[in-house]
Image (spheres, coloured by chain):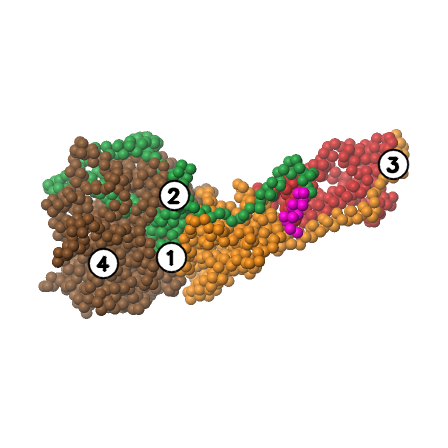
Amino acid sequence: MTNNWTDIKNADVVWIMGGNAAEAHPCGFKWVTEAKAERGAKLMVVDPRFTRSAAVSDHYAPIRAGSDIAFLSGVINYLLTNDKIQREYVKNYTNISYIVKEGFGFNEGLFTGYDESKRTYDRSSWEYEIGPDGFAVRDETLAHPRCVYQLMKKHYAQYTPETVERVSGTPKDKFLKVCEMAASTATGDRSMTIMYALGWTQHSHGAQNIRSAAMIQLLLGNIGVPGGGINALRGHANVQGITDIGTLTASLPGYLAMPTDSEPTLESHLGKRTFKPLQANQTSYWQNYRKFYVSFLKSLYGEKATKENEFGYQWMPKLDVAYDVLRMFEVMHQGKTTGLLCQGFNPLMSVAYKAKTVAALSKLKFLVSMDPIETDTVRFWENHGEFNDVDPSKIQTEVFMLPVTSFVEEDGSFTNSSRNIQWKWKAADPYGESRRDIEILADLYLRLKKLYEKDGGKGAEPFLAVDWNYKDPTHPSSEEVLKELNGKALVDLKDAEGKVTRAAGSQLASFGEMRDDGSTDGVQWIYTGIYGPNGNMAQRRDNSDPSGMNVYGSWGFCWPANRRILYNRASADPQGKPWSDAKKYVYWNGERWTGADVPDFVPTIPPERGTGPFIMNPEGVSRLFARGFMADGPLPVHYEPFESPVTNPLFPKVRGNPVARVFKGDMEVFGSAKDFPIVGTTYRLVEHFHYWTKSVHMNAVAQPEFFVEISEQLAKEKGIRPGQMVRVWSNRGQVKGKAVVTKRLVPLKIDGKTVHQVGLPLNFGFIGETKKASPVNSLTPAVGDANAQTPEFKAFLVDIEPIPGPVA
Amino acid sequence: MFPPIPNPTTQATPAKFGEADLIRRSASNITPAAKRQTEVAKLIDVSKCIGCKACQVACLEWNDLREEVGVNVGLYENPHDLTPNTWTLMRYTEYENPESGNLEWLIRKDGCMHCADPGCLKACPAPGAIVQYSNGIVDFVKANCIGCGYCVKGCPFNIPRISKVDHKAYKCTLCSDRVAVGQGPACQKACPTQAIVFGTKDEMKKWADKRIADLKSRGFKNAGLYDPPGVSGTHVMYVLQHADKPQIYAGLANNPTISPIVELWKGLTKYAGLTAIGAFAAFGLLHHIVSGPNRVSDEDEKNAKRLAQGRS
Amino acid sequence: MRHSEVAPGDSVHPGDPVVVDRYTTGARINHWITAASLVLLALSGLALFHPSLFFLSGLFGGGSTTRMIHPWIGVILFFSFLGLFLRFWKLNLWERTDNVWMGRLRDVLTAHDENLPEVGKYNAGQKMVFWSMSLLILVLITSGIVIWDQYFSEYFSIEQKRIAVLIHAITAIVAICVWIVHVYAAIWVRGTISAMTRGRVTGGWAWRHHRRWLKELVTGRP
Amino acid sequence: MNMELSRRSFMKGASAGLAGTTLGSLGFGEIEAAHAASIRPFKLARTKEARSSCPYCAVCCGMLVFSAENKAGKLEVTHIEGDADNPVNRGTLCPKGAGALDYIRAKTRVKNPMYRKPGSNRFEQVTWDFAMERIAKLMKEDRDANFIDKNKDGVTVNRWPTMAFLSGSSCTNETGWITWKVARGLGMLQIENQARI
């Protein structure tokens, strides 16, 4: 989230699309109902189904799953052609005036540089024209035919309301009402927030869905302002924190990158990432990358990390290729993986194409599950009839099921979706013999350490180099680990005059104190300040709100630097004045930047210097045109899902995202519209959390059994009665569930053809208290987003039939 | 936002109301407490409800109730009805508004309305099994309940349920144990969108006015408060988008009253019945006094003897 | 041709006084089961009917047990009464003379039996008690089942139950009144109770109150 | 009429006749006891309260967790409700958070380390020591066999390509870092969390 949960209350328009906040985040959604009740905000919902969010909306528009970019592009076209953009904001805070190099082009759905055999782009033509001063060239009149504004006008012209209706199925009047409501916030005194979740990410073009929405917000001047933003509503309690810490194939903590084979030295790694400004007087904050990286290495290897040994850089594993979850299971399926450690994870349920997942797990030598409860995965080898039809005697995997404490049985911190890090205190003793994850991992670490110290072995050195300096090595406490994340001064830190600003051994107050010479450590630079000299800020419980803007700046600690709204410098105009009194947030008071929040800016840089608010970007402005940072193009394009009921009506030659990666074997099991005419989409239910609460009695009571949502029209066509068992199948598997026949789903007219959609809630499986069911990921395709490799769970093809028998 | 009620304390706290605050007690004549407590109420704003069932779960959790895991029957409602364990239930209606042409998903939290004139209490034959406190809470007292099910017949909203296990009547208590220490009911506390708020009845009415004004500004010209006069008002009230048509909300009673049949049964019949029985008994007594026993005379015996001999 | 007024087991024993067998042991057991059920039903029912009589539930072990056993006693009553009904329904068929008897109710109440037509085994009053009890018990069992929530709550709507409970209450009151008439009549008409205790009445009693029955017993002719 | 009075006077009158009979002895005891208070005692009194955070979605609602000692002397959770002080959830909880007590007490909670042998159709209970020793041994065996210190171009890469780790996003930040440290320290590249799925 660029903004935060409580800030939603400052919105005048709330747009929920690609998500269903009422269903997935009810308590955060309260700030939507508050904005409605307290300031008369309007809520609009665009979704294939009339959802729980839609139930309290002012406007609902249906859409075909997987066609979001067409819809959003239609909105962008509306804003551009009707000039409903906040000009001053757009001109100063985006790259709309930047001129793109000659040679860039877009034709029949493809940008320049496409290599069909490799399914990749050579992105070199997607860059700015660089002037003789080394800075990017701009045309502030926006008249240059290659400036971003003109390129966008051209690119988006075809996304007329009629096209949107033809591609997305949204009736024109309903679509236009969305445009009008969004456009009403282009004024500076009104703002709109966009709330989305996996309904946008889980597509082969997921990242571009979100880019489209971000672009709309930039055109309307809604980024960095209260009640605005582009807000990813994240799933798991600490998925934000775990993503921040970087337990992802290519990540280091704090969004630093893993070394790769092409970066044999520390310097070769850092050099590529220390971006120089592309415009005069810009901050380009990533210039500090090396300080964060070296401090990280100092934390990882402790005293063993020295300037001479590149701070231990060579001990780090180097990435040959990114092993996202789809590749992980592909490799496992090829029999190349020996062991899998599952920590609070249920991949049998949550990974696409269940049949492949079972086959892959069966090839493991061993599987370890660390979880407070039994998962379907840990029993993947067990026969559960049609729900998991395997022969245990043929599965040679050794399986360990280790009991782990539940959330109440340990202390520690969680980072919520709006980056707020909050402490939780231990409330109960461990259940049975369960142990904290940290203890289990410490045990494993210490046992392995002993083995390597005793027997040696391959890779002993890099492993033994890891620092493990905890008071009780077998029980590292959450407090000392949080201190480790924050970082400390290793020697007395001095300013230019030689005055000690931070004594050796004391905790750092901010990442601004980090150094690249090995004199500081700190695992997670973005968290620095959480455990500074004043102690554990995650434990702060002061819920006062002095500004009255619903900021609550003294509750917990928000990364970075306790900032509650990102890019908040943009809440003021280029002169530093708030865009309006209604949206007064961070502003220049004549001496410094101040306001309701911690400014996302160097507080002393005056407006006259023209430093842009998007300090992480070398341009200092945000990018409507993404340059080469996106794998599938600098501007979003409507691509159909890999399984689509229609050929791309706009670019018939392109099937799916042209650069999405598809493994052999997965491509072959895509279904065609001829055999599978119906669009399937998966989602979660408010009564359940993923595959977890099916083991929780009260939640099983509230929603006990897998069901399939279908329209009245489809029910009639197929002869399905409400409550009847139906079979839904794709080219990869089948599921059976009760039919919920509803008015909340309607067939749509797509490119002249009637298209039905069926809804498949994902929370059911064969372990737990709910009725046994096959997971919906028996159906889903193993193809991911071209940028993030997030699987395409939200749009695929199925067919449906009633199962004869008594109803309900 | 309606100001949240402060967190509960773990200190033992004396209850703010109790036996001394009863204004009605089933099958008993009591003298209502002289000093009435401020009336409390729960306001359920249907227009803010997302049907998440947090209230249902919070109710189970707080009241230590556990329902059986059921099945899906093609609906979102689960369980399918109120039960002795499910004291509150979300009911979902897909309503096509004929005026706007829009689909509306009307989600109503069903449960005890805590009527000012409670039909359950009126029907109850067991002394003290149903009580009404002066703050408006209508509570079932398990120890006194005999499980006859008369409350079910007395209730105009079809709320009480009789347990098949212990044969006692159950329904929402408005979390009388929480209210007694200054907390709101568990459902209210949990409700993510403040579709449920709790306070004094006056506060709730005022709050409802604000909500109704908002709804009217959004085109719901018949938005209004549901506080039915037929039962002298309730201590659970609804804000409805279409207050002119309560029945579209999963059959919410248009103008609920205690059934005239129940009134007749618990009114006239009760008194007339005993009178009739008394009258018959009295008549017999009187008759006996006036006319004395009807005895068989010697004559009769002789006649009989004669007859019998005649035969032999 | 008149039908017989005699039931199996009825017979006359000459002597002084004449003794007439009116009820067999079976009939008497049947009657007393019915009577006991009815009394218990009345007590338990009244306990649930009016708060001032709730204390009666104490006789049955409290309100819950009262609620629980009342319907079961009702079932006993129903079958027990069914037994009586099958025994006696024929002799309770309405005849023309019953109308005459009814027309002279004043004579009945003032014990001027001599002014009444000769009566068979049952007089019109007894027949009315019989038939009204038959009808009332039928209504009571039916309405009782509708409100017997322990087993039948799912089968009836609340509105049906409300009607049933009202009917049940009114019917029960009527039944109690009829029962009062029945009991009072038995007490008032001396010599009656022995018919149900020992199964016998005196010839004089039979002569006075059921002369046609006695005559048939003696003559063997209806 | 006052019910209490009528009942008592009835008892006085009836007790002589009914004393000693089954009906009598069954009946009045219950009526006597029945005059109980309707309001349950507040069940949080004298429990221990801890501030926690909901384990489910990333709203991270503030929770109050109440616990009490069980018979074995272990602190056990008795009730969970929202923390009204938390500025985000203001005391509210969704159906998942409101039911979290049943997660802690779930029938499928794992109580002891369990182990399934290759080809077996059941889990058997094992000691922590057995499980951890066996896992460490399996890992070391594989790492010894498949660890790559240099790639074919001679670049030091120090990776262990045959081991995968799925890192839970419901774990704390602190667990996340320990996980990262152990997994990367061993040279793992196949690391994923729930950010995508």
The residue at which mark 1 appears reads as A30
Residue A775 placement (x, y as % from top left): 35, 43
Label 1: chain letter: A
Mark 1 → mark 2, Cα distance in angstroms: 24 Å
Residue A98 placement (x, y as % from top left): 18, 64
Where disc 4 sits, the SS reads loop
Do tag 4 and tag 2 residues touch (Cβ < 8 Å)? no
The residue closer to the viewer here, B144 or A733, is: B144
Image mark for residue B301: 3
Where disc 3 sits, the SS reads helix
Chain coloured orange: which letter? B
Q: Which numbered mark, 1 or 3, is in the foreground of this view?
A: 1
Mark 2 → mark 3, Cα distance in angstroms: 88 Å
* Amino acid type assigned to the residue bearing label 1 in the image: Lys
Image mark for residue A635: 4
Label 3: chain letter: B
Q: Is residue D110 visible?
A: yes
Category of crowding for the residue at label 3, using alpha-carbon neighbours closer than 10 angstroms: few (below 14), some (14–19), many (at least 20): many
Q: Earlier in the sequence, mark 4 or mark 1?
A: 1
Q: Are marks 2 and 3 on the same chain?
A: no
Magenta residues span D1-12
Q: Is residue B237 visible?
A: no
Relative height, residue B87 to residue A370 (above, below)? below
